[in-house]
Amino acid sequence: MATKVLPQPERAEIRVESVLQALGEPVRLTIVRALADNPAGVCCGDIELPVTASTRAHHLRILREAGVLSTHTDGTRRISILRREDLEDLYPGLLTGILSAKQ
Amino acid sequence: MATKVLPQPERAEIRVESVLQALGEPVRLTIVRALADNPAGVCCGDIELPVTASTRAHHLRILREAGVLSTHTDGTRRISILRREDLEDLYPGLLTGILSAKQ
DNA sequence: TCAGTAGTTCGACGGCTATCGTACTACGAA
DNA sequence: TTCGTAGTACGATAGCCGTCGAACTACTGA
């Protein structure tokens, strides 16, 4: 197994500007919605997106470095999980507000 | 008096991507925080910002067109008000979550 | 060991956007 | 009517960023 968590900011290091900037992009918002629907985590590549693999990796990096999601390895796969608890603690209501949008 | 409301999207026209993109900019977030502290509305020019008047006008336009704030004239002045009710209805919790951030 | 798969990194490129100065408009006061 | 003030509109510019292809890494299974 030997999973490894990719580098990400501590809860205290998360800045609201970075989070909002990360969320204010259609592709990344799609990713966040997909993660919200799968609390157990999602394999990055399984999310259907209108971009290439490299662009996908770029967006996942932005989201991870902003503190929106956490990624750990699982063999050759990377499993991403929404950092719900951290975000809810820092900005209570923000995530649910965004996800309640009727697209 | 004869105040006039500047063009802005209807509640149904507001898109979450535009709102998040508008909020994901430091200067604009400063504006939103200032408006949140003054429910009665704020004269645009009274908010201290590290940019020129034209840039300030640009940011206010972005926020207005995204549906974050409403602006009406008052003589030569423009009074801006946070569209709290609309945003709360569309994305319940989002605004309070953002504003609860410890900067 | 070797091939295949999942994903990242790098460099390049084009479009977006935050910024500014200048010119302009609108309103109020003298 | 004239001047001053508040703010917008426009054009230019520089930096950021979303996108891609190609090369690379890491792991699995045969």
Image (spheres, coloured by chain):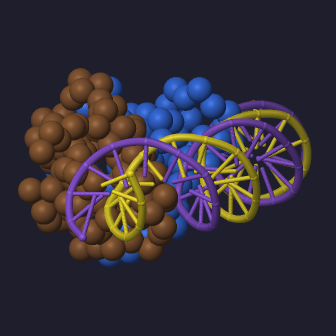
Chain colours: A blue, B brown, C purple, D yellow
Q: Does residue B25 lie above or below A34 as drawn? A: below
Q: Residue at coordinates 12% horizontally, 45% vertically from top-left?
A: B1
Q: Residue B72 or B67: which is nearer the viewer?
A: B72
Q: Is residue A100 left or right of residue D11?
A: left
Q: Position of residue A3 (x, y in %)?
A: 50, 58
| Residue A35 appears in the picture as rendered | no
Q: Position of residue B48 (x, y in %)?
A: 33, 73
Q: Residue B81 or B89: which is nearer the viewer?
A: B81
Q: Does residue B13 lie above or below A85 as drawn? A: above
Q: Position of residue A51 (x, y in %)?
A: 63, 31
Q: Residue D5 or C15: which is nearer the viewer?
A: D5
Q: Residue C18 or B103: which is nearer the viewer?
A: C18
Q: Residue at coordinates 52% horizontally, 26% vertically from top-left?
A: A48
Q: Is residue D23 left or right of residue A44?
A: right
Q: Residue at coordinates 9% horizontally, 56% vertically from top-left?
A: B40
Q: Quadrant of residue A29?
A: top left
Q: Is residue D22 left or right of residue B55?
A: right
Of the 4 image quadrants, the one containing the C terminus of chain A is top left
Q: Is residue A84 left or right of residue D29?
A: left
Q: Does residue D21 lie above or below B80 as drawn? A: above
Q: Quadrant of residue A39?
A: top left
